[in-house]
Amino acid sequence: MMSITGLQPIQQVMPVQGKNQQVAQTSEISFRDILTQALQNVNKLEKESDAITSDFIAGKTDSIHSVLIAAEKASIAMDLVLEVRNKVLDAYSEIMRMQV
């Protein structure tokens, strides 16, 4: 029989690094910090993908697999950020339509 494990806390899934380390120590992570970390991660993946692609074009590497994997990682990360943005905008629109 297959066991099902619970969800992990957000700190384990998306560890906060760098100047936001103080926020992680107090166990209070804001939505803004999570979005900032996600955008930084997407930016890092895009840069890595560009670097690997440039190396492949220049002939420094012959691994097409690593190029495609890096491109897919960057694409999936960007899709996730765009979906979160769309959901936030939908929620904002819904709140603005509410009558007070």
Image (spheres, grey):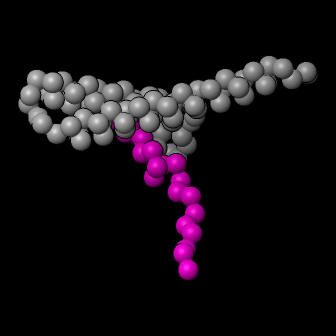
Q: Is residue 5 above or below residue 22?
A: below
Across and down, in percent, residue 21 comes to: 40, 40
Position of the C terminus, as image quadrant, is top right
- Give the side of residue 95 with respect to residue 86, left or right: right
Residue at horizontal 54 percent and vertical 75 percent from the top:
2
Residue 22 seen: no
Quarter of the view holding residue 56: top left
Whether residue 60 appears in magenta in the rendering, the answer is no
Across and down, in percent, residue 40 comes to: 39, 29
Read off the magenta span: 1-22
Residue at horizontal 26 percent and vertical 31 percent from the top:
48
Position of the N terminus, as image quadrant, is bottom right
Residue at horizontal 24 percent and vertical 35 percent from the top:
67
Across and down, in percent, residue 6 comes to: 58, 63
Quarter of the view holding residue 86: top right
Residue 54 seen: yes
Number of numbered discs: 0
